[in-house]
Amino acid sequence: MNLVHTPALILRTIPFQETSVIVRLFTKEQGKVAVIAKGGRRLKSPFRGYLEPLNYVDVIYYTKPTREIQLLSKIESIEFFFRNDRGIEQLAYASAIVECIDKSIRDQHKDDAIFQLTVNSLRFIDENPDLSRETFFTFLFNLTDSLGYKMNLDECSICGKPLTRAGYDVSSGSLICPECRNFSNNVISIEPEAMKFLKAIAFGGSGNQLQPLPDEKCADGLTNILISYLSFHLDYPLRLKSLDMVGNK
């Protein structure tokens, strides 16, 4: 058995037997792994208080290649996110980020860029709750880029003309111009402000440069487009139950 010492984000926990917990981690050193915290539900367990989703922690665990679930040895906090009162929207979008990682990243797929993107996104939501939704959209856009599925915002995927206004073609997983909409039966319109928002992200806009989206219609459209786009390239439907808290599907 080898010993791994790494920063990690807790994605979710599953009670196991009477006193233990299986913990899904997104680690910096080994990507996504599952560990068991033996006795983690006991009142005097050294793990208590740390095994909550969204926690950013430092973990030590024993790993064995032939074992699917590794053995947690030690855990300490690195940074407490969301220590203050959590608003529903803030919690929903933060939870959607870790749920997205859990459902879209392969086990033991190490990726420093995606790990840091996830940590930075959660930290920004913690510090800027009014921009939770916009931060989630920025995370999705940059995640697809890091996975190698960068969205082409410049040219129509059918005719190649520059995009000034666009729609998202669900069947091809790409953006098309208004003139080419007749070639597809399933197109989601992209509001001008949503297109502007996406282009700002593509040109490196993040952090305090984020601007709130103007209305719910614009935000709902972006939710559908970005999740549909990632689902298309993952080749399976990505259902983020966390978004049910804010009425998204």
Image: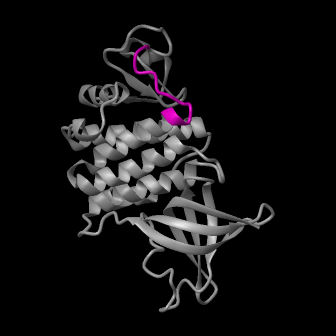
Q: Position of residue 226 (x, y in %)?
A: 43, 38
Residues in magenta? 145-155
Q: Is residue 66 left or right of residue 79?
A: right
In the image, residue 111 sits, relative to residue 23, either above or below, namely: above
Q: Residue at x 64, y 49 (%)?
A: 106
Which of 232 and 136 lies nearest the eye of the viewer? 136
Q: Position of residue 169 (x, y in %)?
A: 47, 26
Name the quarter where the N terminus is drawn. Answer: bottom right
**Colouring of the image:** one colour
Q: Position of residue 159 (x, y in %)?
A: 48, 8
Q: Position of residue 103 (x, y in %)?
A: 56, 53
Q: Residue at x 23, y 52 (%)?
A: 128
Which of 160 and 122 lies nearest the eye of the viewer? 122
Residue 20: quarter of image: bottom right
Q: Is residue 158 left or right of residue 214?
A: right
Q: Magenta stretch mostly in which secondary structure?
A: loop
Residue 197: quarter of image: top left
Q: Residue at x 55, y 62 (%)?
A: 25
Instruction: Let me know if residue 218 appears in the view.
Output: yes
In the image, residue 98 sits, relative to residue 16, either above or below, namely: above
In the image, residue 80 sits, relative to residue 153, either above or below, namely: below
Q: Residue at x 65, y 53 (%)?
A: 107
